[in-house]
Image (tube, rainbow, N blue to C red):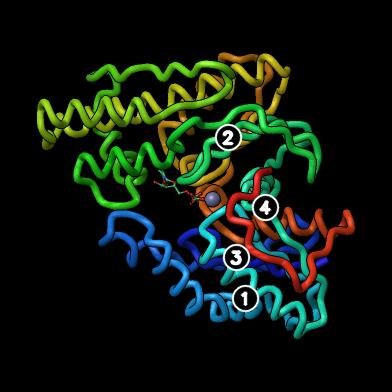
Amino acid sequence: MKILAIETSCDETAAAVVEDGVRVLADVVATQIDIHRRWGGVVPELASRNHVVQVMPVVDEALALAGISPAALDAVAVTSGPGLVGALLVGVQAAKALALAWGKPLVRVNHLEGHLVAAFLADPAPEFPYLGLVVSGGHTSLYAARAFGDYQLLGQTRDDAAGEAFDKGAKLLGLPYPGGVAIDRLAREGNPAAHRFPKAIVKGSDLDFSFSGLKTALLHHVRKHGVPEGPPLADLCASYQEAIVRALVEKAFRAARRLQFDQLVLSGGVAANSRLRAAVEERAREYEGMRVFLPPVRLCTDNAAMIAVAGTHALLRGERAGPELNADPAWRL
Ligand code: KG4
Ligand code: ZN
């Protein structure tokens, strides 16, 4: 079964062809990072316009790389939410038009489900049930993943997403967008114990996250001491990153212990963070019997291959979307 998937929920225009939900025949991502960088973040209107320009070339390239014609496809899958409404609409309209023109079934996919199942394209792949931590620019959520299509939200951020904490923190430090990448790089030379950032206390569910206090603490630090340069800047980045990583690792392992999961799967752009990856591995070694799955960075950041995996299983369950399919910017998984 071969599926073409289209993903345009944020600032990457992506198309992929995946066979049987496991073999990637083509995985094309046209990133808009250079377009948004000068504005210091994603500008929704610019994202939509660039998706319009890129979506068909990206689909054509995916089919060419896969070496197949549209006739050989079994279905078209598309991210219909959550995300930026204008950006989502471009992918949804393209997918609807192509499915209609080619006479193929259409399936809608939740972007977060895509992140949760991206690890099935990596080797080794997890097995259900597992604990999934989605950490991206828009989301910080812990899920119990029990089967394809069966996910239970265990905890999420009350304010900023982890990626937002990186991006906003980087902006305060005058670092380029996307901030997570810049902080990750500088932090490698820094001392994570140089500064103490407050531990986020969240009332209510102790599996929820909160990162806005951390960002405020950094703001106060910068107001008081200015933005440092050289090694002190690296120390500040390393300490700030460590506070984010500590919160993510702590909650994930708390949930794993409480619900007796023995597999933890990370995904989303922040899962590309080198310190988070190392910290999760370290913690898993102390935690007997815990296996962690850290998909390659390309599968962690936004891509359409992960949408194809989720779409394949939605199709197998008999789900179909019709011509009335619309973008659902706040679709909760
Ligand atoms: O999943 P993603 O590509 O797009 C969303 O769905 O949001 O995630 C983008 C986020 C951005 O906030 C970016 O700063 C962060 O992932 N990110 C990182 C790293 N690479 C990307 N954060 C920390 N360390 C990284 N190496
Ligand atoms: Zn994402």
Mark 3 and mark 4: span between their CA atoms? 18 Å
Q: Nearer the viewer, residue 152 or 258?
A: 152
Q: Is residue 165 above or below residue 319?
A: above
On the image, numbered disc 2 is attached to which residue?
141
x and y percent of residue 262 in the render? Answer: 71, 23
Please name which of the two marks, 1 or 2, marks the residue nearer to the observer.
2
Please name which of the two marks, 3 or 4, marks the residue nearer to the observer.
4
Tell me which amino acid carries mark 1.
Answer: Leu
User: Residue 27: which numbered mark, if any?
Assistant: 3
Determine crowd level at label 3: few under 14, some 14-19, many 20+ residues with C-alpha closer than 10 A.
many
Determine crowd level at label 4: few under 14, some 14-19, many 20+ residues with C-alpha closer than 10 A.
many
Helix, strand or loop under label 1: helix
N-term-proximal mark, 1 vs 2: 1
- Residue depicted at x 22% and y 31%: 219
Helix, strand or loop under label 4: strand
- Tell me if 244 is positioned left or right of 74 in this view: left
Mark 1 and mark 2: span between their CA atoms? 34 Å
On the image, numbered disc 4 is attached to which residue?
110
Tell me which amino acid carries mark 2.
Answer: Ser
- Residue depicted at x 61% and y 76%: 59
- Tell me if 223 is positioned left or right of 190 in this view: left
Q: Quadrant of the C terminus?
A: top right
N-term-proximal mark, 3 vs 2: 3
Helix, strand or loop under label 3: strand
Q: Is residue 186 above or below residue 76?
A: above
Mark 2 and mark 4: span between their CA atoms? 14 Å
- Residue depicted at x 44% and y 22%: 246
Asked if residue 123 can be seen in this view, the reply is no
N-term-proximal mark, 4 vs 1: 1
- Whether the residue carrying mark 3 lies under 8 Å from ligand 1 is answered with no
Tell me which amino acid carries mark 3.
Answer: Asp
x and y percent of residue 238 in the render? Answer: 29, 29
